[in-house]
Image: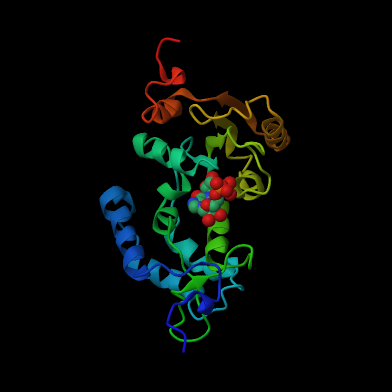
């Protein structure tokens, strides 16, 4: 027969479930709750793991729904202080470096749900042992896979619970435009902000140091984003290369003209 794990045996195109998923999720949960956020001391990490497992184990990984995650979402969600939510699109690394250096802001990965799931993969299989460690479906193979459904739902809840002034960090070095309406930010988060709770959206448009400035705050996709938000009654501002974030980029490019104090 074929050697185990050889490529032609793979059912799906995405990497399989993370090895030791239970230990990874439990370890992250305890670390988040006990070491970082003692105010969440009543979270039950074992129950949280069980509800994540029940959402996908032994199920067809193309048929996952929001309902499958309802128990997990109820157990693991917690509020975020007003004015502290940071959304991002195509700035994954920079946005998370920023929240690590500035404890004043929270991305979804700085909440318990996002912290547990960040960079982890999981999917089920109807036959024993109910978890597929070899491969998982890519979004292009099926939209309703466990990981995609999870991030969409977690992003929706993260947006719903935001209040006050919220921030979004976008990438002005992307040729196709900084704001993409098919992104999770553009298709889910902006439409789940509550106009009764959120007053304003501050856009931080960052471009790569030394990279192209494909778009500025007056660019086409930003104007489109602002009009969508203003139509929903949010005030908007946009700042090119918000300095506190640019200084983080400068850690890797200290000699660049954009990074010098006197210009
Ligand atoms: O599609 P995106 O960006 O606009 O999604 C980012 C947006 C953020 O504001 C987050 O709150 O949506 C939330 N989010 C995550 O926090 C997240 N962590 C990891 C959305 N997706 C997330 N991922 C994975 O990255 C997930 O697999 C998703 O498909 C990508 C989206 O990245 P993007 O296109 O840069």
Snapshot quadrant of residue 168: top right
Residue 224 to residue 8: above or below: above
Farthest-out residue, bottom: 1
Farthest-out residue, left: 35
Residue beneath the point at 48% across and 62% down = 74
Snapshot quadrant of residue 253: top left
33 left or right of 246 in image: left
Residue 42 in view, yes or no: no
Residue beneath the point at 56% across and 69% down = 137
Residue beneath the point at 46% across and 81% down = 130
Residue 18 to residue 199: above or below: below
Q: Which colour scheme is used?
A: rainbow
Residue 166 in view, yes or no: yes
For the residue pair 261 and 203, the one nearer the viewer reads as 261
Q: Residue 112 in the image: x percent, y percent?
A: 40, 54
Q: Residue 54 in the image: x percent, y percent?
A: 47, 75
Q: Residue 225 in the image: x percent, y percent?
A: 68, 36
Quarter of the rendering occupied by the C terminus: top left
Residue 73 to residue 201: above or below: below
Farthest-out residue, top: 262
Q: Residue 200 in the image: x percent, y percent?
A: 59, 32
Residue beneath the point at 42% across and 81% down = 4
């Amino acid at each position: 027969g074929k050697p185990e794990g050889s490529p032609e045996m793979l059912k799906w195109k995405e990497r399989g479930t993370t090895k030791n998923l239970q230990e990874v999720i439990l370890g992250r949960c305890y670390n988040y709750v006990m070491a970082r956020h003692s105010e969440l001391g009543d979270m039950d990490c074992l129950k949280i793991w069980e509800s994540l497992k029940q959402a996908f184990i032994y199920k067809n990984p193309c048929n996952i729904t929001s309902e499958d995650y309802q128990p997990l979402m109820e157990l693991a969600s917690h509020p975020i202080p007003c004015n502290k939510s940071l959304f991002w699109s195509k700035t994954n690394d920079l946005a998370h470096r920023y929240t690590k250096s500035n404890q004043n802001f929270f991305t979804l990965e700085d909440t318990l749900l996002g912290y547990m799931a960040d960079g982890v993969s999981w999917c089920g299989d109807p036959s024993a042992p109910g978890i597929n460690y070899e491969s998982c479906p890519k979004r292009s193979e099926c939209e309703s896979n466990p990981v995609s459904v999870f991030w969409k739902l977690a992003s929706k809840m993260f947006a719903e619970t935001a209040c006050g002034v919220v921030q979004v960090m976008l990438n002005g070095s992307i040729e196709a435009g900084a704001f993409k309406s098919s992104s999770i930010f553009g298709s889910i988060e902006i439409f789940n902000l509550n106009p009764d709770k959120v007053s304003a959206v501050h856009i931080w448009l960052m471009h790569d140091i030394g990279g192209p400035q494909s778009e500025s705050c007056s660019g086409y996709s930003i104007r489109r984003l602002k009009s969508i938000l203003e139509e929903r009654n949010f005030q908007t501002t946009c700042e090119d290369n918000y300095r506190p974030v640019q200084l983080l980029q400068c850690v890797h490019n200290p000699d660049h003209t954009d990074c010098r104090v006197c210009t």
